[in-house]
Amino acid sequence: MHVLYAWQQPSKLPRRNLLTIISTFLILYVVTRFLPGGRSVRTLNTANKTALLENLIAHYVRLIPEGPAVSRPPVQSPFNFRNHTLNELNFLDCMSILSVQVNLRPASIYIHTNIPRSSGHWPNTSCNRWITDWSNLHLIPINLKHTTAGQKIKDIQHEADIAKLEAVYKYGGLALDFDVYILNGELLRHKLATTPCLSCHEDPGEGNDKINAGFLGCLEPHAEFPGRVLDVYKKDFRPNEWVYNSGEQPFWIMVEHPHIVTLDDNVCVEPEWLNRHMELYENNKWQNMTAYHSYFHMFPGAFNQEDFERTQIILLSDMIRWFAAKVGIHIPINYA
């Protein structure tokens, strides 16, 4: 039996088929007009992003090994100025928080930590010399995971990397290492509003294919990028490969799904890369960068303001003195 299709006899199309076509057209119009990609949804998304920016959360993670290490004795500063417990936030940690308060002005700062309030280190007594308003600080108690993907998590840094991803995935916002300093907060907010997630490359253009785990922002909770990275931790964790899970796998996720994350320029570059490209930072050009990852964390818990005054890390020194001066904090220079 020969079947004649509708498009073969357009002039004889039954009325029922015409109504079906018209109904289908109307449904498609409504879908394209009001569901994702339509103008109304874009307006709603803009409103949502405005609300999310107004309630922006900055995340830090402060973890210490469980057991006797929680109550480590004071250690002598490598610059021989004073004793300082490793649990405390040091001067550079405090300056990172200050940069967030001054230049980013988030609604809240979450410190995800397994250090109990009873330890005496909260609320951040070591920072009170420079920061007096802690009204937007919230301590989020978390526990160490100890294992993932059937593997033991050996390094506290790996625990912290997972905790940062989980914080951004659960709450949205910006997760930072304590050696990252916010410089141009308005530009950072703009970038967070125009990409699903924002991260940074350690050596752009030089074949070092890894993302840095110390700077990750996703304006909305449950973003795809941190979710995918967490999935890798759950399925393929390699405890003896330092940056496999935190750096290399996130990079290849970005390559496969370029629409879910954008890399910010020159934020997390390694010191050796920076030394080869100092022209990007000269003449205060860094003031037009969103942030700066200093990698200066060799002496956790033991670096104070007096230590800083004697350092000759000129770029970091200029940055910190610049944003500290915005709130009337003058840090002298006392090079040895």
Image (tube, rainbow, N blue to C red):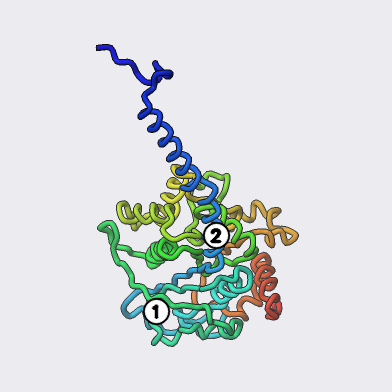
Q: Horizontal and vertical percent for residue 297?
A: 52, 68
* Dot 2 amino acid type: Ala
Q: What element carries label 1?
A: loop
The span from disc 2 to disc 1 (Cα, nearest Å) is 37 Å
Q: Horizontal and vertical percent for residue 116?
A: 38, 82
Dot 1 alpha-carbon crowd within 10 angstroms: few under 14, some 14 to 19, many 20 or more: many
Q: Is mark 2 on a helix, strand or loop?
A: helix
Report which quarter residue 190 is drawn in: bottom right
State which quarter of the image contains the C terminus: bottom right
Q: Horizontal and vertical percent for residue 224?
A: 42, 52
The residue identified by callout 1 is 115
Nearer-the-camera pick, 40 or 52: 40
Asked whether residue 216 is in view, the answer is no
Looking at the image, is 205 positioned above or below residue 166?
above
Nearer-the-camera pick, 112 or 330: 112
Report which quarter residue 189 is drawn in: bottom right
Nearer-the-camera pick, 111 or 74: 111
* Dot 1 amino acid type: Ile
Nearer-the-camera pick, 263 or 9: 9
> In the figure, is residue 238 to the left or right of 273?
left
Asked whether residue 156 is in view, the answer is yes
The residue identified by callout 2 is 47
Q: Residue at x 35, y 52 (%)?
A: 232
Q: Horizontal and vertical percent for residue 329?
A: 68, 80
